[in-house]
């Protein structure tokens, strides 16, 4: 189906795409559920409790006399948390050193070249959600993708003014001259859920609402096309509609539109379903007179 860049109905109806059902989620946090660390925390609380209290007093005595009592009582819990953080970073340190040994040093020439310049072919815009991780799921290696991640993988309109997302876009397109922009949405997106659940009036005290309202046209389309569906299903529709809206919003940037029209830059949408582990990809196909088609729609399962 053809459409003009001024239209907000550019794509075949996303609601018509076969969508595997998923169990409804009772969680509505932006970034999903927090991993349970209670076992680890308990271990360290136990270890800490077994410490000689004298050592705590010696440590505290270097600070101020009043600190001793504080450290031996009320702040045990916070020290336990610090201990826990050290443990977390032990794991991170191990991962880094493993990366250095098995990736960096084994591909030294490649990384030395990257140290002087980068020439990624991709600009990726993905959600901040910890489960999305484009480098992991699509295998982007260092130097291959300039990336920005924000809540709900949204691209604001050009006329909305500067944000960190369009600052990254400007650098990627005008300086790095990437050949592809890929906007990746995903299943169970808490940012989209927040967008769908918010009132008409934005609560200006909420940074989340003030940001996700960028996707309000996607919300309107999802509500219109999926009005009889459950809220969860409407959210799923909006997850895909928001990608389409972001692709259209990219075209409001003159330096992006020009490169697309000259065939120097391609714009793609992607949808990562981490419930069923599938990935859907499609590409905008520019036509004369400002019309666009969707092409190369593929579904990886
Ligand atoms: Zn998300």
Image (spheres, helix red, strand yellow):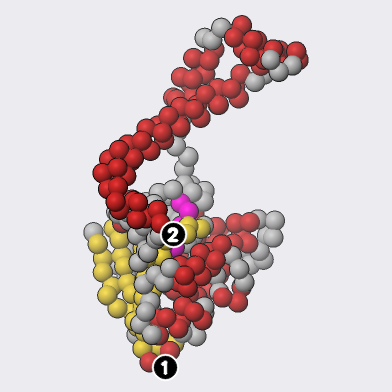
Q: Which residue is mark 2?
A: 147
Q: Which residue occupies the foreground of this view, 208 or 140?
A: 140
Position of 38 relative to 189 (above/below): above
Can the viewer see residue 90 in this picture? yes
Q: Which residue is mark 1?
A: 289
Toward the bottom, the furthest residue is 289
> Where residue 262 sits: x, y (%)?
38, 85
Residue at 37% x, 63% y is 120
Position of 156 relative to 141 (above/below): below
Mark nearer the N terminus (1 vs 2): 2
Q: Which residue occupies the foreground of this view, 299 or 196?
A: 299
Q: Residues within 10 Å of mark 2 (few under 14, many from 20)?
A: some
Quarter of the rendering occupied by the N terminus: bottom left
Toward the left, the furthest residue is 301
Can the viewer see residue 231 in this picture? no
> Where residue 153 sits: x, y (%)?
47, 62
Give, as a single range, the part of the protein colored magenta. 124-129
Question: Main SS of the magenta segment?
Answer: strand
Queried on whether the Cβ of the residue with tag 2 lies below 8 angstroms from ligand 1, the answer reads no
- Measured in 3D between alpha carbons, the distance from the residue under mark 1 to the one under mark 2, in whole angstroms, is 31 Å
Residue at 28% x, 58% y is 278
Residue at 61% x, 68% y is 162
Of circles 1 and 2, which is in front?
2
Quarter of the rendering occupied by the C terminus: bottom left
Residue at 55% x, 57% y is 194
Q: Residues within 10 Å of mark 1 (few under 14, many from 20)?
A: few
Tag shown at residue 122: none
């Amino acid at each position: 189906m053809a459409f003009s860049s001024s239209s907000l109905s550019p794509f075949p109806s996303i609601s018509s795409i076969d969508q595997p059902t998923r169990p409804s989620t009772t969680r509505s946090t932006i970034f999903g559920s927090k991993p349970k660390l209670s076992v680890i925390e308990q271990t360290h609380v136990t270890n800490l409790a077994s410490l000689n209290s004298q050592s705590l007093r010696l440590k505290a005595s270097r600070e101020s006399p009043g600190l001793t009592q504080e450290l031996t009582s009320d702040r045990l819990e916070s020290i336990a948390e610090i201990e826990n953080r050290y443990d977390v970073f032990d794991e991170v340190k191990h991962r880094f050193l493993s990366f250095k040994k098995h990736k960096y040093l084994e591909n030294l020439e490649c990384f030395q070249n990257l140290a002087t310049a980068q020439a990624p072919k991709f600009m990726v815009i993905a959600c901040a959600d910890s489960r999305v991780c484009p480098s992991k799921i699509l295998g982007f290696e260092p130097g291959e993708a300039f990336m920005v991640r924000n809540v709900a993988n949204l691209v604001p309109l050009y006329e909305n003014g500067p944000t960190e997302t369009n600052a990254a876009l400007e650098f990627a397109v005008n300086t790095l001259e990437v050949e592809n922009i890929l906007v990746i949405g995903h299943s169970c997106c808490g940012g989209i859920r927040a967008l769908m659940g918010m009132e008409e009036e934005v609560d200006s005290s909420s940074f989340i609402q003030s940001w996700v309202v960028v996707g309000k046209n996607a919300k309107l389309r999802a509500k219109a096309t999926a009005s009889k569906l459950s809220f969860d299903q409407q959210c799923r529709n909006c997850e895909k509609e928001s990608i389409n809206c972001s692709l259209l919003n990219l075209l409001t940037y003159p330096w992006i539109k020009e490169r697309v029209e000259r065939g120097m830059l391609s714009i793609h949408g992607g949808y990562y379903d981490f419930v069923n582990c599938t990935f859907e990809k499609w590409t905008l196909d520019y036509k004369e007179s400002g019309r666009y088609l969707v092409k190369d729609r593929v579904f990886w399962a």
